[in-house]
């Protein structure tokens, strides 16, 4: 059985992210990188020039990949979000809140970069999740 604890020490971080996440017990660590709006079959960027739609698409992909690996959004302990324009931050925050609705938030880093892996890609996530082992 996993014991996942999330901590916030500063008032302003409440509801935004966890400052520290600890995981104790037998579990499987899942590392996901480059989760964005690339179509799963042909790789074309979905919803060019629509940040909110790309963000929702990326979270849907994330949830599906976690599920295939025996995990869920509740098992995410660390997230890094990359965007190509800092003005996307409010929309990214709303999209993230919807994706984690009802769950405690993971530790989170938000970065603005000059570009991502593909043209028209506006958002990308790196994720670390820890899921309980099936036997535990």
Image (cartoon, rainbow, N blue to C red):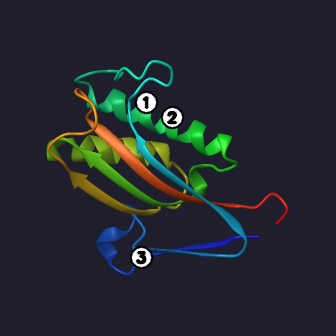
Q: Is residue 20 above or below residue 115?
A: below
| Label whose residue precedes the other's in the sequence (2 or 3) | 3
Q: Secondary structure at mark 1?
A: helix
Q: Secondary structure at mark 2?
A: helix
Q: Position of residue 33 (x, y in %)?
A: 43, 48
Q: Which quadrant of the view contains residue 122?
A: top left
For residue 8, which numbered disc appears in the image? 3
- Which numbered disc covers residue 57? 1
Sequence-first disc among 1 and 3: 3
* Residue matched to label 2: 61
Q: Are marks 2 and 1 in contact (CB under 8 Å)?
A: yes
Quarter of the rendering containing residue 46: top left
Placement of the N terminus among the 4 image quadrants: bottom right
Seen at 82% across and 66% down, the residue is 136
Left or right side of 72 for 17? left
- Foreground tag (1 vs 3): 1
The alpha-carbon separation of the residues under discs 1 and 3 comes to: 29 Å
- In the rendered structure, the answer to whether residue 94 lies left or right of residue 76 reads left
Frontmost residue, 35 versus 91: 35
Q: Which mark is residue 108?
A: none
Q: Residue at x 45, y 18 (%)?
A: 42
């Amino acid at each position: 059985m996993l014991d996942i604890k999330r901590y916030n020490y500063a008032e302003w971080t409440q509801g935004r992210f966890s400052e520290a996440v600890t995981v104790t017990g037998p579990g499987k660590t899942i590392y996901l990188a480059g989760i964005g709006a690339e179509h799963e079959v042909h790789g074309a960027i979905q919803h060019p020039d629509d940040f909110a739609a790309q963000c929702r698409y990326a979270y849907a992909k994330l949830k599906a990949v976690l599920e295939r690996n025996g995990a869920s959004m509740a098992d995410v302990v660390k997230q890094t979000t990359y965007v190509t324009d800092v003005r996307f931050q409010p929309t990214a925050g709303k999209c993230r809140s919807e994706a984690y609705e009802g769950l405690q938030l993971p530790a989170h880093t938000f970065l603005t970069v000059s570009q991502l892996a593909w043209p028209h890609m506006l958002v990308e996530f790196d994720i670390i999740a820890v899921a309980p082992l099936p036997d535990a």
